[in-house]
Amino acid sequence: MKIASLHPDIFSEYLGLVDQEIRPAEAATHIWEDFPLLLGGENLPWILGGFENRELVAGAACLVRQFRTSCGAVPVGGIGCVVTRPEFRGRGLSGELQAALISRLVAANVPLAVLWSDKPEVYAGRGFRPAGWEFHVDLQDVPSGSGFPQGFRCRPFREQDVAAVSALYARHPLRTQRNPGDSARLYTMPGTRGLVAVGQGEEVVAAVFCGKGADFHQYVGEWCGPGGLVMALLDEALAAGWARHVLIPAGAQSLAEALTRRGAVARAQPSGLWVVTQPEQLSRYLQGSGLGAPADPADPAKILGSVDSQGVVVPGALTLAVWGFDSV
């Protein structure tokens, strides 16, 4: 199999293949609508195709962004939309594509890569291990709170709210450092609905976003603003039938703690399947922030932490948060 970056002329064929092979039959959105950054035309250099006799038989994509972590900014590659035509499966083509993407990440000095799958055993042989953590909270059995404080109210998110919500998101100390234009494309994805809390002068002071196409159905995948207002917005999202769960990334446990005080159950699970592509480079990030060299810099669980068999979070050398909208 020959591997190469996709030419624009073949891009639509790859998108059609991914849509056909990955999207659930009942999905109301297309794959490129759910992942507008990963599958945007400007990301073509990071989208690889596998070719046999000039025919596209497989493909994979990667989105590289800086993450604000507990040891400063660290670049991370998110791998997704790995697909092979049915008649070519079982030949290790997807593994070859992932190896090619990791080689490119190494060349670009990106020390960490992550992908998401409900079959971790498939990727274990390729070096990917469950690591990091996030909390999933069921909202359905949580009693409603006392509503919005006087002077605040809820309304649907509008496209003109992007700048205000982006500024609120930027207050999270642990987050993806989004490129200009990223937030506008994420917050206006088809299949995504947002609610904002506004105060005096219609100032947007908090927001929650529900759904991400077929991938985060009935989930709040991102939120920002003061905890009390976020809690009130979650009550509104639940009452509207927009969300039954909320994803809370590492470092944002205060919301999980507030919800558990109201009776919710917060379940910890790994934030993805991770591989350390450059152990020495990652060690330099940690040492540069004064954290010291990790005992095993090649083990993603030692770097990012893990969730043990009892569902307890075991912290790692650094803390990194993957918000739902930034998963690929």
Image: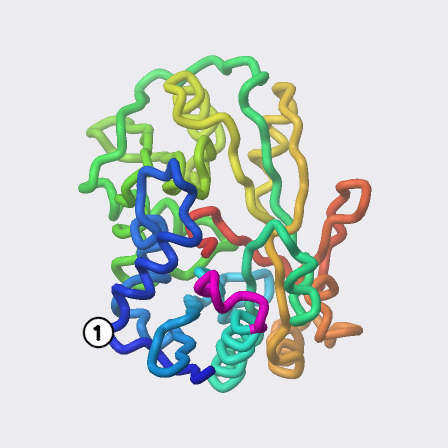
Residue appearing at x 56%, y 63% in the figure: 114
Q: In the displayed structure, does residue 250 sit left or right of residue 316? A: left
State the count of labels. 1
**Lateral position of residue 272 relative to residue 207, left or right:** right
Relative depth, front residue between 173 and 128: 128
Does the magenta portion include 86? Answer: yes
Identify which residue is drawn at 52% across, 53% down.
322
Tell me the residue at 29%/45% (across/down): 189
Vertical comparison of 157 with 319: above or below = above
User: Is 197 above or below relative to 52?
Assistant: above
Residue 276 appears in the picture as rendered = yes
Quarter-wise, where is residue 304 in the image?
bottom right
The relative height of residue 78 versus residue 26 in the rendered view (above or below) is below
Query: Which range is magenta?
Result: 84-92
Report the residue at 43% width, 39% height from top.
Answer: 223
Indicate the amino acid at tag 1: Asp
- Position of residue 14 measured from the top left corner of the image (x, y, whole percent): 33, 65
- Residue 3, given in percent of the width and then of the height, sits at 43, 82
- Does the image show residue 64? no
Q: Position of residue 285 (x, y in %)?
A: 60, 76
Q: Is residue 57 above or below residue 86?
A: below
Determine whether, in the image, residue 191 is placed left or right of residue 171.
left
User: From this viewpoint, which residue is outermost toward the front?
Assistant: 87
Looking at the picture, tell me which residue is in the foreground, 10 or 313.
10
Q: Position of residue 148 (x, y in %)?
A: 39, 18
10 Å crowding of disc 1: few (<14), some (14-19), many (20+): few
Quadrant position of residue 187: top left
Q: Nearer the viewer, residue 204 or 105?
A: 105
Residue receiving disc 1: 9
